[in-house]
Image (cartoon, rainbow, N blue to C red):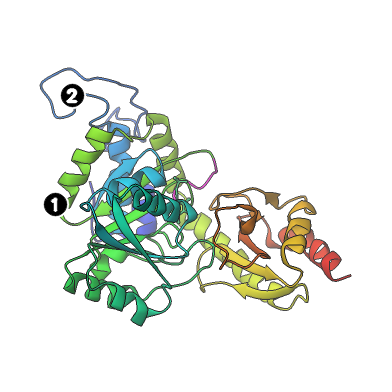
Amino acid sequence: MSDSSRRPATAAVHAGRPAAEPDQPLNTPLTMASTYVAGGDLEYGRYGNPTWAAFEEALGELEGGRCLTFASGLAAVSTVLDLVGTDAVVVAPRHAYNGTVMQLADLEARGRLQARLVDVTDTDEVVAACTDAALVWLESPTNPALEVADIPTIRAAAHEAGAYVVVDNTFATPLRQRPLDDGVDLVVHSATKYLSGHSDVLMGAVLTRDEELYGVLKGRRDLIGAVPGTLEAWLALRGLRTLHLRLDRAEENARTLVDRLRAHPAVAEVRYPGFGGIVSIVLSGGALAGDLLTHKTRLWVHATSLGGVESTFERRRRWKTEPATIPDGLVRMSVGIEDVEDLWDDLAPALDDLVG
Ligand SMILES: *Cc1c(COP(=O)(O)O)cnc(C)c1O
C-alpha cells in the first residue's frame, strides 16, 4: 500500500509489493495470464494484470497520481493525443521527442488535428499559442536539445484556454520533477528509458490525478490494446527499484563530464539543464566530427535511446527526420553509471583526435 509520507527512494524500493504476510513472496510475481476466472474485476488480460498493477502503483506513488502502463512510450503518447477532437489545436515543442513530432505530423496530414509547434523556451510565444488550444504538450527538458519549459506559467495559460496540459517527464523522472504538483493534467513517460533503466524493455506510462481522465484513458487502453507485456512490466518494476541510485550516479558522472567537455577545444557548446544524466554537445567540426567521435570509442556505445546503466551516444541528425534546427554536429550523450574516469579516458582521446 502507498504511504504518502515516505520519501521517493523508499517508495522506489517498497511500493507495489505484495502484503508482508507469511509465505507471501517479497516481490510481485510475474503473472502470465490471458484470462482470469470470471466474476472478479480483471476478467481478461487486455483489461488488467497484477504485474502491471504493481508497476503502476510504484510509479503512481513516485509521480503522485494514478498510473496506466502502455506497450511503449509512443503508445502512451498516441493514447493521450486521442483525447482531443477532430481539428483540435495541439501546441507542442518543435524540439519534442522526434517520434512525438512525427506522430503529430502524421495526425495532421490525415486531417485529425492541427499541430502548432513552438519554441518551448520562449514562454511568451507558448502562452500566445495556447489561446485556442485543446491540448498543450510539454516536454521538459526536450530530447535532444535539452530546453527547459516554464511549466507553471504555461500550465496556467493553457488552463485559462480550457486546454489539457501534458508533460513528457521522461528525461527528468519523478525524482527531479513532479509535474502533477504543478497542476498539469497528465504526465507521460517512456519507461523504456530511466524508469526501467537497463536498455532491455519497451514500455510507456500515463499518470493523472483526474479520476475522469483516468477512466477515459483506461477505456482507450482497453479498446486500442496497446498494453505492455507482463515480463516487460516485471522488468521495469525491477529496474525502478534502483532508479534513485542510477540517476544519482549518472547525474554525478554527467556533471563531471560537463565541466571537462566545456573546456575541450573540439566542443563548441555543451547543453546540460543542470540535472539528470543526458548531456548534448555540439562539435565544432560538425557532422563529420560527430560521426568520427561516435565510431572512435570503446566504452561509449554508438546507439540510439538513453537512460540505461551503460553510456551511449549518437549524432542525432544521422536520423533524416530530426529537425534541421538541431545542429548537424550535436551528439546526445546518455551518461551511464560506470566509473567516470573510465568514461573520460575513453572519450578524451577521441575528442583530441578531432582537433589534431
Ligand atoms: C524515447 C522517448 C519517447 C518514446 O518512447 P518509446 O518507449 O521509445 O516508444 C517519448 N518521449 C521521450 C522524451 C523519449 O525519449
Q: Is residue 198 magenta?
A: yes
Magenta segment? 195-199
Q: Element type at marker 1?
A: helix
Task: Indicate which disc residue 211 carries.
Answer: 1
As shown in the figure, which amino acid type bears the numbered disc 2? Answer: Glu
Q: What residue would you read off at disc 2?
A: 43
* Residue at the farthest right position: 356
As shown in the figure, which amino acid type bears the numbered disc 1? Answer: Glu
Prevailing SS of the magenta stretch: loop
* Residue at the farthest left position: 39
**Foreground residue, 211 or 317?**
317
Q: Quadrant of residue 318?
A: bottom right
**Foreground residue, 59 or 90?**
90
- Residue 230: x, y in percent? 37, 30
Real-space CA distance between mark 1 and mark 2, rounded to the nearest whole angstrom: 22 Å
Above or below, 228 against 256 in this view is: above
Q: Is mark 2 within 8 Å of ligand 1?
A: no
In screen coordinates, is 122 left or right of 310?
left
Which residue is drawn at the image coordinates 18% and 39% (left, top)? 219
In screen coordinates, is 207 left or right of 236?
left
Task: Indicate which disc residue 219 carries.
Answer: none
Q: Is mark 1 within 8 Å of ligand 1?
A: no
> Looking at the figure, which quarter contains the C terminus?
bottom right
**Sequence-first tag of 1 and 2:** 2
Which residue is drawn at the image coordinates 22% and 62% (left, top)? 134
Residue 272: tell me if it is visible.
yes
Above or below, 66 against 33 in this view is: below
- Residue 200: x, y in percent? 53, 38
Q: Is residue 200 magenta?
A: no
